[in-house]
Amino acid sequence: MANVSAEQLGTESISSLLIKQALPASIGILVMSLNVLVDSIFVGNWIGSIAIAAINVVLPISFFIGALGMAIGIGGASIISRALGANNKEKALRTFGNQISFTILITVIMVVLGLTFVDTLIPAFGGKGSIFELAKIYYVIVLYGVPFLALNMMGNNVIRSEGKPKFAMIAMIIPSVGNLILDYILINVMDYGMEGAAWATTISYLLCFLYIFYFFLSDFSELKLNPKYLPINFSILKEISSLGGVTLARQAVVSVIYLLMNNILFDLGGEAMVAVYAIIGRMLMFALFPVFGVTQGFLPIAGFNYGAQKYDRVKESIYTAIKFAAILATIVFAGLMIFPAEIAGLFLSHKPGMSEFELATNAFVLENTPSAMRWVFAATPIIALQLIGAAYFQAIGKAVPALLLTLCRQGFFFIPLILILPNYLGELGVWISFPIADVLATIVTGYFLRKEINRTLVG
């Protein structure tokens, strides 16, 4: 799990590099996902299942703003990886400086807008009925920490583009561990309820920011913080935006999906049905961590070798990443098919003195979550090709196909399906939309990836 220098991305064996890059990325994503998972379990057990639904309403709003930083980070990281591969250190440094300035500017604007329209946004994303007040408490506090989240997401991708996955992993672990410790103190010990959950999250973002800031001041980083590179360079900003737009578009679609899903499910089954989706949403973030880890590890390898015109290594990295990710996805699939009821039970409170409403909500969630979870993850073994295929175009700087393939599953297929099928099949129509979209998107991505490999990765 040692860090590698940028040059080693072009010389070491692909399998060895992918393990070195993907393992720490997977561990970091695992810890981050465990944080979300355990955080939800704590909230469900110590506050109640409606509180899980409230967080589910807030997440797409705060994460969209945080995803602005991720978009800038991934877009800039693609430029940096290729610049380092081409031995253009000046462009790498200027790109990094522009990433910092752009992230601060745009996220502060978004936070101001988010706080201004809080009473409109929360109901729009499904924060209705008894969910609203808890969601508002959580939303306002967490939004103060979102600029730090955006800078963390940006910095993490830059660290990985330097070939320093171990430091990127630590940067993901710090807020996760910090959040869980603060959750226990603020919710369970000090009994601050939803406010405690929100402050735990916000403070954890700050802790991560301090670590990343330290990294870029230290000798570990090849990209030093330098004020002379902070002024906006519009040609670099355009390139960052075109590539980062892929990630931003993906998160925008995710936020739209949360909006639609929370509202559709609220109409079908009220707060309890939103809680079912909240649990499944946590598993979507957690269970696929090894696949996302392989995808993150693949990006700098493909980008560097493409920049260095080592096309055989690029091709090998694609096939190796798909193979690794597919094996891991199949293992995840097996676990989710066998233990869905046990997973659902982890999120539910068993405290004495629960109201009839809380007891009825728990019973509904426990009854409906297992079958829904099996449908949602039914096509998991094949998603590796779709994720790696879309990531490849992003790694080599081809923004348009990367954008279209990224939007393929959720935007072009999933959203139309959840708008149509529930009208005929009710809640079943919602759940079966997931595997149908996965299959269709994988077929499309496989076609275009094969075509691109045959056209460009020759010689």
Image: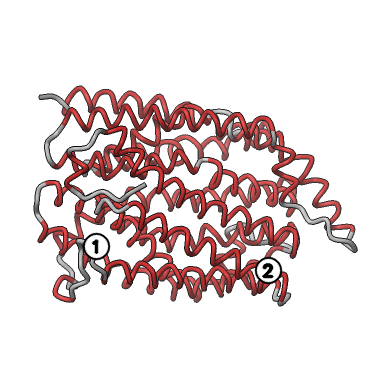
Kindly identify the amino acid type of the residue bearing the numbered disc 1: Ser
- Residues tagged 2 and 1 counted as in contact (Cβ below 8 A): no
- The crowd level at tag 2 (other Cα within 10 Å; few <14, some 14-19, many 20+) is many
Residue depicted at 36% across the width and 50% down the height: 247
Residue 244 shows in the view: no
Q: CA distance from mark 2 to mark 1?
A: 41 Å
Secondary-structure class at tag 2 = helix
Residue depicted at 25% across the width and 33% down the height: 13
- Count of numbered marks: 2
- Nearer to the camera, 106 or 296: 296
Q: Is residue 442 above or below residue 149?
A: above
Residue 418 shows in the view: yes
Residue depicted at 63% across the width and 32% down the height: 375
Horizontal placement of 296 versus 206: left or right? left
- Nearer to the camera, 458 or 223: 223
Question: Can you give x and y, in whole percent of width and height, for residue 224 in the image?
Answer: 20, 68
- The crowd level at tag 1 (other Cα within 10 Å; few <14, some 14-19, many 20+) is some
Question: Can you give x and y, in whole percent of width and height, for residue 118 in the image?
Answer: 55, 71
Secondary-structure class at tag 1 = loop
Q: Quadrant of residue 298?
A: top left
Q: Earlier in the sequence, mark 2 or mark 1?
A: 2
Q: Quadrant of residue 52?
A: bottom right
Q: Which residue is mark 1?
A: 221
Horizontal placement of 101 versus 45: left or right? left
